[in-house]
Amino acid sequence: MTSVANPLQVSRFLHVYDTAAAQKGIKVSIGFDFHEYVAITQALPTKSPTYPNFRPDRSPIKSGEGYWLVGVDKNNKIALVEAARLYDLSGSNFADHLESLKAFYADPIIHAHPQDLCRCVAPTAKKIGGKVAYHGDFWLRRDFRGQGMPKIMAGILRGVSFAMWAPDFICGLAPRWIRDKGVLAQYGHTHHEPGGSILRLIEENIADDDLLVWLTGEELRSLVDRHDRTEPVQT
């Protein structure tokens, strides 16, 4: 995208979702040090391990090209985490980025196992390029599930990503059960396709067959621009 974000409109957009989180009893904060993020997520007993694309030992994230969110309850106990990073795919596309394993490792030659592989057959992945905001590593504590939190979490991520990067695309990879159980709709993903990432990372003990989910930059801008500050989040 070529135009910058309207900071006032973004602040109004974020205010709605931040307020909605607070009404659920969660205070959300933002961080940029991914060493700290990994330390936080490793201490969550029910969360699956953070994938290497958000771990600085495998894929360092430059300053200004990634952030994470953490939400705590009234007792200051962690209730949610999620993360985002920016991929510069001006000379590539998301499908190639995945299949080269560069989406997961800064240097696949050094870090990838010889049998690691990723296949991406989702047609739209070939069209996702430019500034791409990748959202992932969602985790929500069990006692806050079923309360509409996915919509709130996605809204905050979208607002922050738009403010920081005004990306050409926002995308992610989602397990099929999220769609089958209706959780995907709660996140408000406008588009999804199967075959986003058929992934095997041997040393990470990862074996996935995920959906590709995405929004275009113009769709993201439209979400932010039309969101009135007084409009409540329906959850």
Image (tube, rainbow, N blue to C red):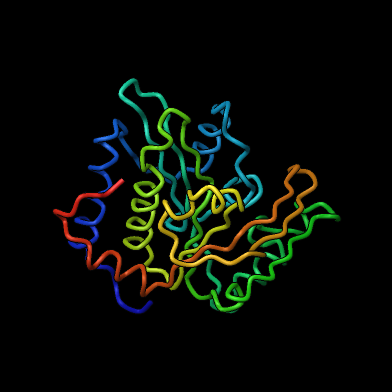
- Where residue 11 sits: x, y (%)? 21, 55
Q: Quadrant of the N terminus?
A: bottom left
Residue depicted at x 47% and y 71%: 131
- Residue 158 location, x and y as percent? 37, 58
Residue at 82% x, 52% y is: 113
Q: Note whether 30 is above or below 184 in the view shown.
A: above
Check the image and name the residue furthest to the top.
Answer: 75
Which quadrant would residue 76 be assigned to in this image?
top left
Q: In which quarter of the image is the C terminus?
A: top left
Report whether 142 appears left or right of 222.
right
Of all residues shown, which one is farthest toward the right? 114
How many callouts does the rendering have?
A: 0
Is residue 39 shown left or right of residue 149? right
Q: Name the residue: 56% across, 78% down.
A: 127
- Residue 182, position in %: x, y? 49, 50
Who is closer to the viewer here, 157 or 21?
Answer: 21
Looking at the image, which residue is at 33% across and 38% down?
28
Q: Nearer the viewer, residue 16 or 115?
A: 16
In the figure, 20 relative to 231: above or below? above
Residue 30 position within the rendered picture, expressed as x and y whole percent measured from the top left: 37, 43
Which residue is at the front of the view, 30 or 140? 140
